Amino acid sequence: MTDGSHGPVRVLVADDEPLVRAGLRLVVDAAADLAVVGEAASGPEALAAVERHAPDVVLMDVQMPGLDGIAVTRTLHERPAPPRIVIVTTFGLDAYLHQALQAGADGFVLKDSPAELIQQAVRSAAAGEAVLSPRMTRRLIERYTSAPATDPAPPDGYQDLTGREREVLHLIAQGLSNAEIGGELFISEGTVKTHVTRVLLKLRLRDRAQAIVLAHRHGLHREPPRFA
């Protein structure tokens, strides 16, 4: 994988609608640090195109013939060194969001998202960060906020977090971006990114979305951590 520092991030566009593929290609190629290296119109084509083009990131539709995007994502994650995968769909249903995250997707954005958000989703995925459109982040948080904590005990690894890392986890659970967390804690965005990386590592989480789910499952979102 690459973060684009050694050339453009290589992107595969997988969608069964030719106009959508063309639109996503325009969005991606409009950014100097991103480049479309291939397209696919079905699930099987997407699997073959990943083998052929070795993309860094796949922009993956959910509903495709032959094999849907979530099944393709799951299949790719059974292979060594899979590409990063950003689900791009017109369907903002909770079921798709949770299935995509469980299958190993690194991001989830809606097709009506601004071009800049789609471009940033590709960059973030290539850099190993998860991205959810603001609308989907709210849905994820609302789903877990409305339910009581299912396990009030601290999760494994929580005791290894520093006080600052616990604060960062609490703010991640509120749906704040790195920039917003930095503003809350009066620290730089780069410092926040370091804390987020350490939180995910210590809690053995793949991405931010998993951190939101875990925090809400253990009730860590309801009040700031206490260190006394």
Image: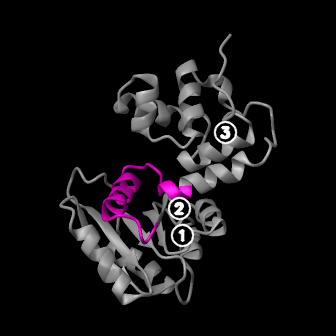
Percent x, y of residue 48: 43, 81
Q: Foreground: 118 or 196?
A: 118
Does 65 appear in magenta?
Answer: no
Residue at point 59% right, 60% down? 101
Q: Quadrant of residue 215?
A: top right
Mark 2 and 1 residues: CB-CB less than 8 Å, in contact? yes
Q: Which residue is mark 1?
A: 73
Percent x, y of residue 76: 52, 69
Disc 3 packing (10 Å; few <14; some 14–19; many ≥20): many
Answer above or below: position of 97 versus 25: above
Q: Is residue 198 left or right of residue 159?
A: left
Q: Is residue 70 left or right of residue 154?
A: left
On residue 215, which mark appears?
Answer: 3
Q: Gap in Å between the C-alphas at discs 2 and 1?
A: 7 Å
Q: Gap in Å between the C-alphas at discs 1 and 3?
A: 25 Å
- Point out the stretch of residues depicted in magenta: 110-136
On residue 197, which mark appears?
Answer: none
